[in-house]
Amino acid sequence: MKIQWQWALGAVLAGALMLSGCTAGKAVVPAAGEGAGALPKEELVLAIGGEPEAGFDPTTGWGRYGSPLFQSTLLKRDSDLQIVNDLAESYETGGGGRVWTVKLRRDVRFSDGKPLTAADVKYTFDTAAKSGAALDLGNLQETAAPDDYTVVFTLKEPQSAFVGMLVSTGIVPKHAHGPAYGERPVGSGPYKLVQWDKGQQLIAELNPEYYGVKPPFKKLTFLFLNEDAAFAAAKAGQADIVSVPPAFSKGLPAGMRLEAVHSVDNRGILFPFVKSGGRTPEGYPIGNDVTADPAIRQAVNKALDRKALVEGILEGYGTPAYTLNDGLPWFNKEAVVADGDLPGARKLLEAAGWQDSDGDGVREKGGLKAEFPLLYPSGDVTRQSLAIASADMLKGLGVRITVHGKSWDDIEKEMHASAVLFGFGSHDPLEMYHVYGSRFSGVDYYNPGYYSNPAVDAYMNQALRAGSENEALEYWRKAQWDGTTGLSGRGDAPWAWLVNLDHLYLVKQGLDIGRQQIHPHGHGWPVTANIEAWRWKP
């Protein structure tokens, strides 16, 4: 199989440039059933990206966005993003929200045949907490396993969002975990990894020990291809599902259809919230005198035409973004601004004293020009296009933005003093706390603009102290906008959110990928979260 796919990959790559040019014209959906029998029905070939550099170890972050596939989680979210049991039979909170007790099902075995017990859950969370990687387990005080099927988590402070850790943390076996685990994981998920040729392909087979509803596919082959080569693989009939950018959404390959899945995989402009003059411990500058003015931030939020960005940059495959969490259970619809309002934005700036007194097209106030840099990661064509289009839209407002593509290393040094086009999007409300909480100012990439509002902090702390995720919803929503203040564009506007990307997939006719969740940020394989529901249909 390896030799066969290496040959196929070479052929695909050789023809990629020629084939990828055939994307003009209207999308044509092939007739139902066409191509459905091109490959054995018990195998799937996927070119959906998502190869993790660090491997498939949940204790260092694998599975944070979407299903870990090779491991199981204590809880999971269904198609409506409601929390349901997975490894857990039940869970309850006590001790004022500080103690979480989880009862495990007793019929679970890892792919090596050994039983999964509370000791494995304790080991997983203890190891993840010590790794200090992508998982925020800093509030976890202790994990205990009083018996083989009971786990007790004790938190330092009440945290309703801790349920997100139970949803996103895949359980690893204590007996088989070590430095090389990420390359050959042992887990209790629906599939087991059998071969990984880095940079080329990964082969997974059905886990015979899996306790849940088994998918109908005995083998999955993931091809790690760039966008051109993945599209060429689809045209050559060598893949069943392929992720594609909006530019490849037209001129569908024969025998395939396009599936557009809504997401909270958002893109937005972070503003430095404070005035200039500060320095980080590393000596990087903090603050920007222009974006520190709330009138500038609010006017930009009003003037941007998000619908035009969706149509012009994303080929219509996306939605306007107004918050970090559009469409999720904790989204506040009242936080939405009426965008594309250039006259209203001009009035706002004029009332705040920003005038173009010298007629050069750029407003000024007290000798300060309404101009600032906007950074984006070079090599990201979508972010580049969004940055350039946004800057162009704001020329009519009298705000001049200079767009610069830079490496992440350079962005990290400048992001506290320059606007940056970032992307976020998670199924966990804790992300809002990280991105907007004052305690995370200057911490990694969470709150580089140093945003702070005591009322917003108070609402988010109330949300964390709530007895459940449902009880917390009111406070998460008020943090966005309470009628007077909030972190949204209607309030302090520390961000100007632009778009939520649709995740686009070319899918072979006859392959039903079920009812997809709203997808999170595009790391990992979120499309496979419901692979148990995928089916070939005649």
Image (tube, rainbow, N blue to C red):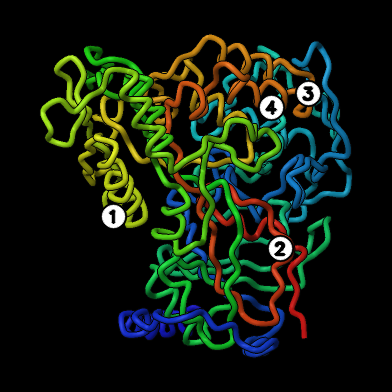
Given the image, on which type of amino acid does mark 1 rest?
Answer: Gly
Give the quadrant of residue 496: top left
> Can residue 181 be seen in the rendering of this structure?
no
Q: According to the image, label 4 marks what residue?
A: 162
Given the image, on which type of amino acid does mark 4 rest?
Answer: Phe
Measuring from the top left, give residue 363's x and y in whole percent: 21, 28
Categorize mark 4 by other alpha carbons within 10 Å: few (<14), some (14-19), many (20+): many
Q: Quadrant of the C terminus?
A: bottom right
Give the quadrant of residue 452: top left
Q: Is residue 83 left or right of residue 439?
A: right
At 25% across and 12% down in the image, what residue appears?
278
Q: Is residue 383 left or right of residue 259?
A: left
CB-based contact (under 8 Å), mark 3 and mark 1: no
For the image shown, how many numbered marks are present on the structure?
4
Q: According to the image, label 1 marks what residue?
A: 379
Q: CA distance from mark 1 to mark 4?
A: 35 Å
SS under mark 2: helix
Q: According to the image, label 2 marks what residue?
A: 531
Given the image, on which type of amino acid does mark 3 rest?
Answer: Glu
Q: Nearer the viewer, mark 2 or mark 3?
A: 3
At 33% across and 18% down in the image, what residue appears?
352
